[in-house]
Amino acid sequence: MIIAGRLLVGFSLGFIQILIYIYVGEITSPNIRGIIMTSLSIFQCTGCLIGFCLGPYLSYLQFGFVPIILIIIFIALSFFLNESPVYFVIKGDEESAKKALNYFGRSKDVNYELKIMLQNAKENAQGKRKWLELFQRSNRRALLIIIPLYIIEQASGVIAVILNATAIFKLAGSSVEPAVATMIVGVTNLTGSLISPFVVDRYGRKVLLLFSAGGCCLAMTALGTYFYFRQMFPESVGSLGWLPLTALVAALFTYSVGLTIIPHALAGEMFSPKMRGLGTSLGLTVANGSGLITTSIYSYLAVNVGIHYAFWMFAVFDLVGVIFTIYVVPETKGKSLSDINAMLAK
């Protein structure tokens, strides 16, 4: 029953994630899109924190009623959502697209932005259909940026750490109660996500990605080194019981500022309107597959080889993320969806 439930939740979550990032990316204006997109992680981290706080004290049955209540509220409110202007443009309903722009407070975009949307929709309609179009012009470049970012996000090590936080603290012999330490991790994750929306449009996506991947790299290196010495020279780390929690808090904080949300935000910005759903779906599929592989590798290394090798592996992926961000990821701060699409098409 637990496995069946997790399969259903995983399928549903992947489906709704795609819709949320596409929808939010299409209804927001360029000057606030970064803030709104990164704000989504606040609610994701809040949900994780609720789980961390209630999980140790509730049974599966009792805990199940918590998300059920939230789901009922979500379904009820979803009936009041208005379609995005991009949706109406794709359907050829220019008048409804104008009304949608006004509805979402984007009246200044009615002339210029709507004109660009209509032009892009016309060009897209004349091109190849479905999957083939993902590998042409701007969509191909977007794909080559988004998919590696999703892989780096999942291979950064933080997802595996979150899923195994309590076990890691027990293994580390931390002086902090594992359940309490896990709650601290959740609070840190939420704190980082609260900061991200206020700095993303000031410093840009690349700066946050660099800070996030670099911070995770240092934290994972520290964790790997600690567990190596704990295994090989236990007496040398007797006074360092505080280190695992400190490193995990640093990793969670830096991760939640950038890697947890920027790849999703860029996916919602970079693909052409007609390919946004397909491109984001492919990206999230790769992300979930990468998450499965990295957590499986982590479990194998932790049990059969040594947990320090798992953390060092994550550190290498984080370093690759830093290099990839510097040389490959473009800055989209302050650009409209149409401008981003034109930039990637060059």
Image (cartoon, rainbow, N blue to C red):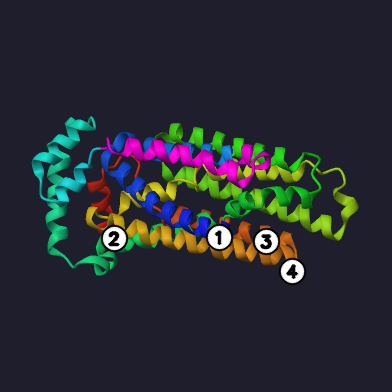
Q: Earlier in the sequence, mark 1 or mark 4?
A: 1
Residue 314 in which image quadrant: bottom right
Identity of the residue drawn at 14% across and 58% down: 123
In the rendered structure, the answer to whether residue 232 lies left or right of residue 66 reads right
Query: Which label sits in the foreground, 4 or 3?
Result: 4
Query: Which label sits in the foreground, 1 or 2?
Result: 1
Identity of the residue drawn at 54% across and 44% down: 64
The residue where tag 1 is placed is 3
- Contact between labelled residues 2 and 4, with CB atoms less than 8 Å apart: no
Q: CA distance from mark 3 to mark 1?
A: 25 Å
- Label 4 neighbour load within 10 Å: few <14, some 14-19, many 20+: few
Residue 246 visible in the shown view: yes
Give, as a three-letter code, the residue at label 2: Asn
Q: Earlier in the sequence, mark 4 or mark 3?
A: 4
Identity of the residue drawn at 14% across and 60% down: 125
Q: CA distance from mark 4 to mark 2?
A: 42 Å
The residue where tag 2 is placed is 139
Q: Pinpoint residue 132: horizontal percent, then vertical percent.
A: 25, 70
Q: Pinpoint residue 86: horizontal percent, then vertical percent.
A: 20, 46
Q: Earlier in the sequence, mark 3 or mark 2?
A: 2
In the rendered structure, the answer to whether residue 103 lies left or right of residue 234 reads left
Give, as a three-letter code, the residue at label 4: Asn
The residue where tag 4 is placed is 304
Give, as a three-letter code, the residue at label 1: Ile
Q: CA distance from mark 1 to mark 4?
A: 25 Å
Residue interval drawn in magenta:
52-81
Q: CA distance from mark 3 to mark 2?
A: 34 Å
